[in-house]
Image (spheres, rainbow, N blue to C red):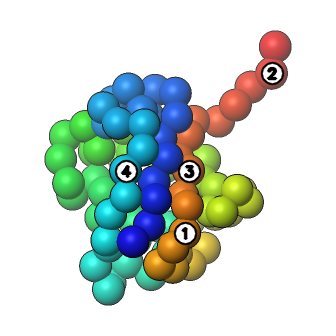
Amino acid sequence: MITLLYFAWVREKIGLGEETLSVPAHVKNVGDLIAFLIARGDGYADALGDSDRLRIAVNQDHVDFNYPVSDGDEIAIFPPVTGG
């Protein structure tokens, strides 16, 4: 099981702030996870379809889409943050 945390407009489009789920064995890295989530439905596809607009943290460390995911990980998905 992994825990997914969604923030800002990603949360709004998906309709959830957090969920815990099991992922199939073919999900080996963040990119695979995003593809798996997009296939879950329209809200996910709308929120996650443009990877240039996403930032990912695994266990509170910023990572790229090649980073491996493992059972027990906490994965946060959020838009880029800008200061003001």
Tell me the residue at 38%/26% (across/down). 12
Question: In the picture provided, is 72 more to the left or to the right than 15?
Answer: right
**Which is more N-terminal, label 2 or label 3?**
3
Foreground disc of the pair 4, 2: 4
Question: In the picture provided, is 60 more to the left or to the right than 23?
Answer: right
Q: Judge the density around disc 1: few (<14), some (14-19), many (≥20) Cα neighbours within 10 Å.
A: some
Would you name the residue on which mark 4 appears?
19
Foreground disc of the pair 1, 3: 1
Q: Which dot marks residue 83?
A: 2
Location of residue 33 (image quadrant): bottom left
Residue 46 is situated, as x and y percent measured from the top left of the image, at 30, 37
Amino acid type of disc 1?
A: Asp
**Which is more N-terminal, label 1 or label 4?**
4
Distance between the alpha carbons at the discs numbered 4 and 1: 12 Å
Quarter of the image where the C terminus is located: top right
Distance between the alpha carbons at the discs numbered 3 and 4: 11 Å
Would you name the residue on which mark 1 appears?
73
- Secondary element under disc 3, as helix, strand or loop, is strand
